[in-house]
Amino acid sequence: MIDNELCLSIDLGTGGPKIGIATLDGELIAHEIHRVTTTFGEDGSATQDANEWWDLIVDSASRLLADPRVDPSRVRAVAVTGQYASTVPVDEKGVPTGPCLTWLDTRGGRFTRRAIGGPVQGYQARAIARFIRKTGGAPSLSGADPIGHMLYLTNEQPELCSRTRWFMEPVDYLTMRLCGVASATHASRLAMWLTDNRHLDELEYDTGLLSLVGLGAERLPPLVRTGSNLGPVTSDLAARLGLGENVSVFTALPDLHAAAYGAGATTMNAVHIALSTTSWISCPVTKKKTDILHSIASVPGLTHGAYQIIDNQETGAKALEWFQGILAAQGQAMTLDEMTALAKTSPPGARGVIFTPWLAGERSPVDDKNARAGFTNLSMTSNTADLIRAVMEGVAANSAWLFRHVERFAATELKPVRLVGGGAQSELWCQIFADTLGREVHQVRDPMLAQLRGMALAASVSLGQRTFDDLSKIPIPVQVFQPDPTNAVVYHNKSGELEGLFTLNKKWRRRASRSR
């Protein structure tokens, strides 16, 4: 029976890895969550230790497989998801030759701008046209993506490159450590923008796009189909973990895709919102398409030949975690549960306080790395409860701004909305999202662990235990939040104020950025 077979699921978030054991029906049996440190530098560096990830994951998997509730002989698959747009340089055995350059690392920006910079929204007209036509997107001029990372390493760290066989996404790096096979898919390398996504059967990198940015394909791992079986877990690792020889490792997926599986949002136009470190709004769609003005595109999707909407808001639930740290520094240490409980004592609208959530700039629906966060309309009577609620409402208002453009992109009304991610653990935040979006919101059970559950479901399809269409028949427990019409008026006005503040402060942000 499929519900007796297990998957070892790994979700490598920016904050650290989550590791879980789940049935192939998506029931999570046991899990662990670990934190890692991102090291920031004044030169724009933002790195993590990929060896630290691996050690945490293997040690955690050992403990989970020794749990009395888990029978290691029932494990059939290992599946990996996690952050993307990051780069791990590795040798021929998959061992890191240097730190991971995360999606926050901008050191390669000057090389990207030198290669394809120009007058059309910062790009050369010919270059941006070719990238959009073939891939649906384009390299970031900030350098915060694999092209920027590879250009930086090639130009600035030749000694490291001489020891490097592959430039890999974190999730592909982990699958190589698991099974010894170097691989990538159109989906796992979506943020590289170097595959012709009009033709997903072409398992090769586009030489024309590579030449535009001055790179070759010699350090790019071979492309295979999404959902491919890469082979068994290596014998050494299997022996260390107590796994059998029949445990398969499958191609990795970005957390965007795993969240769709875990939210039960795999059918056409079934929408989910991730309220995680960052935030996004996504659903499966039928074709490749791009809204360049609002940084929305459709990219290689859940299965080979499918597409998925991609966009990104640089700060999601991280905004509340950031404010938690501010309060702790002022002697008001609170858990997230305590913060949200206090926020309930402030009325909808936070008594007029507005929070702009752009702590790390913004990407969708406007691309502005200079955007910054702040509180507006504070008064002598504003209190901590108002500020916490304003943070929650500001993140929701930012999502509502993007949501309108995503609906226009999908050309249909998107409802209900499935909500996943750490922030979705808060029932208050779920209700705020329902009121702000004007949509029924479904809080998925254990929303912070949705990607672990999702990878087990994806593995069941790759194993041939069920078809992709069968997934829609699996019930995903949810709690339903209906929009309150009275609150909707308050939040509609607040969303408008948020957009107005963004436009009003544009010139000031440019001036302020010169002093940073």
Image (cartoon, rainbow, N blue to C red):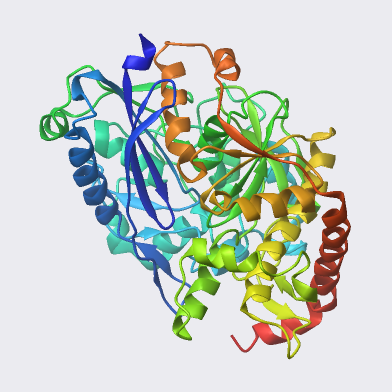
Instruction: Identify whether 333 is placed above or below 215.
Output: below
Q: Where is residue 275 in the image (x, y as percent from the top left)?
A: 59, 51
Q: Residue at x 65, y 29 (%)?
A: 307
Q: Where is residue 18 in the image (x, y as percent from the top left)?
A: 36, 46
Residue 261: % across, % down: 54, 30
| 224 left or right, relative to 340 | left
Q: Can residue 206 be seen in this view?
A: no
> Where on the picture, by quarter, is residue 297?
top right
> Front-most of 159 and 54?
54
Q: How many marks?
A: 0
Residue at the front extreme of this rendering: 345
Q: Quadrant of residue 36?
A: bottom left
Would residue 354 be found to the left or right of residue 167 on screen?
Answer: right
Residue at (66, 23) in percent of width and height: 267
Query: Taking 439 as reference, is 110 left or right?
Result: left
114 over 165 or under it: above or below? below
Camera-nearest residue between 169 and 457: 457
Identify the residue shown where x is 33% and y is 52%.
89
Q: Can residue 121 be seen in this view?
A: yes
For the C terminus, the quadrant is bottom right
Which corner quadrant holds the N terminus? top left
Q: 416 above or below 76?
A: below
In x, y percent, where is residue 269? 73, 29
In the rendered image, the residue lying farthest to the top is 1
User: Measured along the vertical axis of the image, is residue 243 above or below residue 386?
Assistant: above
